Amino acid sequence: MAEGGSSGNRSHPQNMQGLLHMAIEAGAGEHDSNVASQMTEERRKWLQEAMSTAFQGQVDEVQQMKDCLAHLQRVTGGGDEDAEEQQEEEERKERALEMLADLCENLDNAADFCKLNGMQFLVEHYLDRPEAGLRSATAHLIGTCSQNVPFVQEHVLSLGAMGKLLRLLDKDSSEAVRTKALFAISCIVREQEAGLLEFLKLDGFSVLMRAMQSDVMKLKVKSAFLLQNLLFSHPEHKGALCSMGMVQQLVALLRTEHGPFHEHMLGALCSLVMDFPQGVSECQAPELGFEELLKERQQLIETQEEFQEELEFCEQLLRVCFQSQPDDQSMDR
């Protein structure tokens, strides 16, 4: 008897795979008397409860999102609140935004959040909050929701978020807000044609260039990386970028103190010149002194393993722009 009792407990699955297997067995039992006889009433009841709990998880997460939104929508800041209470309330709101970001790592939750009008509320009421912490957390949440989810990307664009995010990136006084705004912009425009078109319409490349010229290293690196990726994915915009002086501005930035963002700027220049004679011609302008700069950079980093990719970009630019003239027979070596 003792053995039979213990075997009943051991037979309960300990993970979702086992739970699903048990559920399949139970379903088969409706047509198979042998299987049905093997499942005791106790096991069947346990299975029903376990499956109910498992599927309740998604419902619980939707409810958590509703609860977070309800807290964010709560009106605060009345005259009867002292500074300490206001600070505590701001921290609670930041935690609500952080919890939403965690929940919306799940793509289904990100879509559900939009269906709950959560995204509309954030874009309309939180991207311009006076508290930098709330603006930053909101931009991070928008980016998290938008990653690889076309429905969310399109919804965010329809709400006019791109313009607000570009203004934050360009003008906000907080480095953290500017960095999170750039993250959100990147999530909306990469692999999303409509997002890129809106970015172009709002002169996003100029904003990106100004971010690369800032004193914030994280912004410089991430802006240069986004530019490099956009040029690689969308070569059709090379002409527009050359017309706005992108080559000259990138070369000028390469003359600043050497830093990790230089690699991505050189990568962006490589994308600009590949199969694009106008880009090559602009790099060859004598007044730019680009060939000498590239050779100096080669000497600076050639023995440093951590700059190997940057070195390869230098060599590629030298080869394409300065060693591929018509009389150079070694162009393709």
Image (spheres, rainbow, N blue to C red):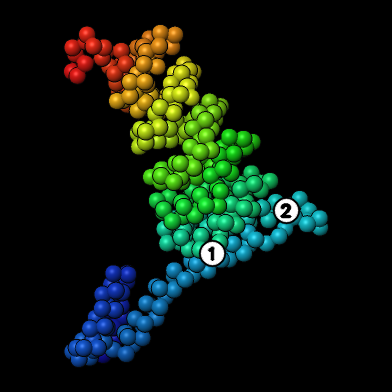
**For residue 189, which quarter of the picture?**
top left
Q: Residue at x 42, y 62 (%)?
A: 108
Residue 160, horizontal then vertical, whole percent: 56, 48
Residue ID for mark 2: 86
Residue 69, horizontal then vertical, whole percent: 59, 62
Q: Residues within 10 Å of mark 2 (few under 14, many from 20)?
A: some
Dot 1 falls on a residue whose secondary structure is loop
Q: Residue at x 51, y 38 (%)?
A: 201
Mark 1 or mark 2: whose residue is earlier in sequence: 2
Residue ID for mark 1: 116
Give, as a three-letter code, the residue at label 2: Gln
Label 1, label 2: how many angstroms apart (C-alpha)?
27 Å
Looking at the image, residue 11 lies above or below residue 259: below
Looking at the image, residue 181 lies above or below residue 247: below
Looking at the image, residue 215 lies above or below residue 329: below
Give, as a three-letter code, the residue at label 1: Leu
**For residue 333, which quarter of the picture?**
top left
Question: Does any portion of residue 161 appear in the rendered image?
Answer: yes
Dot 2 falls on a residue whose secondary structure is helix
1 vs 2, front mark = 1
